[in-house]
Image (cartoon, rainbow, N blue to C red):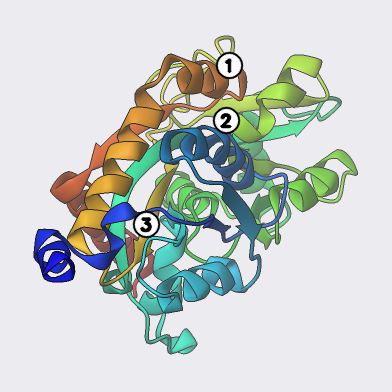
Amino acid sequence: AALSLAAVAGPAHAQYPERNITLIVPYGAGGGTDVTARMLARDLEAELGKPVTVENRAGGGGWVGWGALAQAKPDGYTIGYLNVPSIYAGYLDRQYKRSETLESFTPLMNHVLDYNVWAVKADSPFKSIKDVIEAAKKTPDVITVSAFGAGSDDHLATLSIQAETGAKLIIVHHKSTAEAKTAALGGHIHVLGANISEVAAEAKAETIRVLGVMAPERSRFLPNVATFKEQGFNQVWSVSRGIAAPAGLPDDVRAKLTAALEKTLASKEHQAKAEQLSLEPRVIKGDDYKKFLKDNEASTKKLMGW
């Protein structure tokens, strides 16, 4: 009778979590997503009472990691980051023939918005966005800009800038931000396309000069850097890093994970850590997060012609 009453009272996973949780990062160590994930893991495990282990699964434009997340058991013990807009290329671009889509995941909550930047090494002759655009117009298909795969935020931003200005740039895709930084500092590419959190430390150390920020207004992390709009270019781009689980996650586990994430992101300790890492937490949850993902999917599809 006692067993029967326990079964009626709730599902077997009502005590979730009972063991360690894996947090998949679909990129290599040292990039913006990895830094974001490791910050979250430390604080989330304190809230859930179980270790949260970051697992880097780089490759395939992020789809080595996203594929592993989509195929994991939907029990709440494997969660991971969704990077928008990069995730869309894997299934919108028909050449990849992926069976997974956005419906393969249970979106939980957006964590941060990290706005895009263009940066150069400290001794670059480029002092502004205008300098880069004028050089690209004067010598078409010579000026190189880094990106991280077709349909990534850096890629979309450069395509959009080319469409606005008529400049012709060469987009060079890299596997990681660390690789792109090395290429920029070594003079192998002219412009580093990255995100605020990925260049703020170097900008402060003056090893990298940020030419412009693709945000609606100046970033508090780079207060002396003008936005693209201030420089006459109508470009606002960012990467969204949010948390998801595999599709089919039980409602009670989803509710507990969402509550833990929301409490973690709202804590003063987490906000202080984000500030130190030049990260901008932006909570979007539930149906609002699903709509955010679908709206971005539609705009990416349109810009890329998929």
The residue carrying mark 2 is: 196
Mark 1 Cα shell of 10 Å, populated few (<14), some (14-19), many (≥20): many
- The answer for how far apart the CA atoms under marks 1 and 3 are is 30 Å
Residue 198: x %, y % from top left: 65, 35
User: Residue 212 lies in what quarter of the image?
Assistant: top right
- The answer for how far apart the CA atoms under marks 2 and 1 are is 8 Å
Residue at the spot 47% in from the left edge and 45% down from the top edge: 161
Q: Amino acid at mark 1?
A: Leu
Mark 2 Cα shell of 10 Å, populated few (<14), some (14-19), many (≥20): many
Q: Amino acid at mark 2?
A: Ile
Task: Tell me which numbered mark, 2 or 1, is placed earlier along the sequence.
Answer: 2
- The answer for how far apart the CA atoms under marks 3 and 2 are is 23 Å
Residue at the spot 35% in from the left edge and 70% down from the top edge: 74
The label on residue 193 is none
Instruction: Give the farthest residue toward the right.
Output: 186
The residue carrying mark 3 is: 244
Foreground disc of the pair 3, 2: 3
Give the secondary structure at mark 2.
helix
